[in-house]
């Protein structure tokens, strides 16, 4: 069956809609993930969304709600254990190790379809029910709205924390709120690329954008465009191929954009002149 | 007679169980340039933080523009220590300055001509237009500090708090940056509190010096404060103040103390102050 057939199907349209929302959320937060040195926090939250998804699957067969709860709990724990970068990374490592072990244990109790488990790890947006899709849309809306409200003070707190504090920006509180926004985004992205591959949507687009511009608004815009190209492109390519999962295409497109941006950036980027 | 814009009365500060300056009485008038000197750990930065509303006094009172210090007050502009930005940080000089205008505000703003003009004018005033569109991480320390001053002045503050703004700058940049600060206070009657370990780059501009050692302090004109007798009393150990080629050098116990160009032994002298 051809691509046009699939694109006329509601399930594919829903998936595309979700992919667009996920891409916009990821593209919005990704520059901050890099500014704030939080790549490991993204990885930690998504791995533990896996534990949550396994628990959700076991309890009521709903991995999306499980992943959401898992990611939010982890954001809370990271926020409590350490907001400073070094402290944060070690506390994430500690929680991550234990959480993944727990996830494996939970999965060993699960006797349903084995594909459900791989879907958690590697994503499958087409397997998501319409109820879950609605939930994803809601999460995406919350992330995008929060980022629109927080954008300026969060940028201030991320690039220039000392002056931001002096100007009355609650940098610590913003850091914790951002952890929760991150957890929501990770949950969303995990549905498309899976918990193991979230980094390809939550970091790679911004890493590519950074090679091309130093203007915050441009970086954010490019990051969203790159995430959209990867997520939507990946879905369409997967539909066209008929057999290969979207996550394969999403991660490949994302990586290809990054390589291209590095090459272009090596010609256009200003260098230290002194 | 102008009302003081900063007023500290019998103010004392503690950090944990460590006693810093005590019973500090200080009034700073609009347009006054006051340098704060003292060994590392003597609470110079903490004094700025008290005025910014980020640290609480252990006792006494502080008033900024007639009111208790308040976080995020628009009365104050703040220039922090020069510290390098990551070369990959996605922010240009212009964006850093812009954050001084509305970075603390929530919500989205589409670019407005008025704001852009303001930022452009502030950048021009510090002579940074030629490199304002380069990523800050690629600029030199002196260039970054000029942008910092533009950032601090955007809010049109009545007080400028500077924390070692000349640190790690070469001589010509030290002169250029201090000249900018001096120009601002003369043109706009802005009070300047300038924390430094070396008074020499700003000696000609300074109205008064606050010298803190341990829980003790002295305040007055540079000539009055920076004397052998005064600093010997403050450090409680023999200290010599020497004038060489128009520079002031403070030497004690075989080593140089603030103010001098290359401070490298302040932890030791801080202990002396507390003894």
Image (tube, coloured by chain):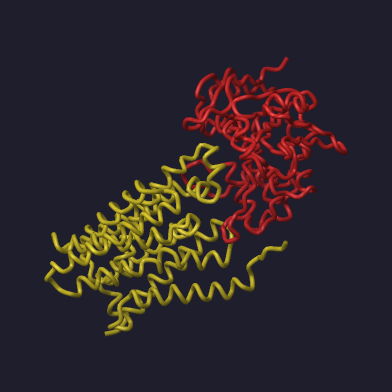
Chain colours: A yellow, B red
Q: In x, y percent, where is residue A91?
A: 36, 54
Residue B229: quarter of image: top right
Q: Is residue B212 left or right of residue A171?
A: right
Between residue B73 and residue A128, name the one nearer to us: B73
On the rendered image, what quadrant is the N terminus of chain A found in? bottom left
* B70 over A122 or under it: above or below: above
* B131 over B247 or under it: above or below: below
Residue B274: quarter of image: top right
Q: Answer yes or no: is residue B183 visible.
A: no
Q: Answer yes or no: is residue B173 visible.
A: yes
On the rendered image, what quadrant is the C terminus of chain A found in? bottom right
Q: In x, y percent, where is residue A62?
A: 18, 62
* A224 over B23 or under it: above or below: below
Residue depicted at x 49% and y 40%:
A169
Taking the view exactly as shown, the residue that stands out farthest to the right is B245
Residue depicted at x 71% and y 17%:
B2
Q: Total marks drawn?
A: 0
Q: In x, y percent, where is residue A160?
A: 55, 47
Q: In x, y percent, where is residue B177?
A: 74, 43
* A222 over A158 or under it: above or below: below
Between residue A186 and residue A107, name the one nearer to us: A107
Q: Is residue B78 left or right of residue B172?
A: left
Residue depicted at x 17% and y 64%:
A106
Between residue A122 and residue B255, name the one nearer to us: B255
Residue depicted at x 22% and y 57%:
A65
Residue A245: quarter of image: bottom left
């Amino acid at each position: 069956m051809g691509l046009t057939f699939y694109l006329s199907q509601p399930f594919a349209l829903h998936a595309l809609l979700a992919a667009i929302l996920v891409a916009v959320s990821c593209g919005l937060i990704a520059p901050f993930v890099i500014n704030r040195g939080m790549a490991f926090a993204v990885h930690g939250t998504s791995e533990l969304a896996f534990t949550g998804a396994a628990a959700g699957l076991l309890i009521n067969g709903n991995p999306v709600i499980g992943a959401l709860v898992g990611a939010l709990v982890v954001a809370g724990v990271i926020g409590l254990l350490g907001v400073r970068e070094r402290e944060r990374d070690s506390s994430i490592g500690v929680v991550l190790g234990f959480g993944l072990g727990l996830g494996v244990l939970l999965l060993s109790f699960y006797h349903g379809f084995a594909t459900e488990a791989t879907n958690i790890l590697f994503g499958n947006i087409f397997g998501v029910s319409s109820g879950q899709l609605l939930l994803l849309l809601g999460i995406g809306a919350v992330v995008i709205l929060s980022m629109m409200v927080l954008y300026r003070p969060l940028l201030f707190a991320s690039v220039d924390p000392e002056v931001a504090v002096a100007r009355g920006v609650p940098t610590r509180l913003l850091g914790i709120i951002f952890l929760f926004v991150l957890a929501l985004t990770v949950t969303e992205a995990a549905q498309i690329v899976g918990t193991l591959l979230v980094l390809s949507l939550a970091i790679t687009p911004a890493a590519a954008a950074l090679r091309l511009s130093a203007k915050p608004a441009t970086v954010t815009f490019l990051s969203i465009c790159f995430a959209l190209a990867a997520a939507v492109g990946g879905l369409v390519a997967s539909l066209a191929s008929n057999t290969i999962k979207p996550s394969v295409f999403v991660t490949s497109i994302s990586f290809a954009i990054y390589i291209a941006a590095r090459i272009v950036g090596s010609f256009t980027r200003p260098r230290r002149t002194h | 007679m102008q009302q003081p814009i900063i007023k500290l009365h019998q103010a004392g500060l503690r950090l944990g169980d460590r006693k810093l300056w005590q019973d500090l009485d200080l009034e700073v008038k609009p347009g006054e340039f006051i340098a704060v000197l003292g060994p590392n750990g003597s609470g110079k930065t903490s004094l700025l933080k008290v005025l910014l509303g980020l640290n609480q006094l252990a006792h006494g009172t502080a008033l900024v523009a007639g009111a208790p210090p308040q976080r995020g007050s628009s009365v104050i502009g703040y220039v922090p220590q020069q510290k390098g930005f990551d070369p990959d940080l996605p922010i240009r000089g212009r964006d850093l300055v812009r954050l001084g205008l509305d970075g603390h505000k929530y919500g989205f703003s589409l670019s407005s001509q008025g704001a852009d003009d303001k930022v452009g004018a502030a950048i021009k005033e510090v002579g940074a237009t030629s490199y304002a569109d380069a990523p800050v991480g690629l600029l030199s320390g002196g260039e970054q500090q000029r942008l910092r001053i533009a950032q601090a002045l955007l809010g049109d503050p009545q007080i400028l708090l500077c924390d070692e703004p000349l640190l790690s700058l070469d001589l010509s940049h030290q002169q250029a940056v201090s000249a900018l600060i001096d120009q601002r206070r003369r043109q706009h009657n802005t009070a300047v509190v300038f924390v430094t370990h070396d008074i020499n780059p700003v000696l000609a501009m300074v109205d008064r010096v606050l010298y803190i050692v341990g829980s003790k302090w002295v305040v007055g004109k540079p000539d009055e404060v920076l004397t052998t007798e005064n600093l010997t009393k403050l450090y409680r150990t023999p200290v010599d103040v020497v004038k060489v080629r128009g520079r002031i050098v403070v030497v004690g116990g075989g080593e140089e103390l603030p103010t001098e160009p290359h401070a490298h032994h302040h932890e030791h002298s801080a202990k002396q102050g507390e003894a």
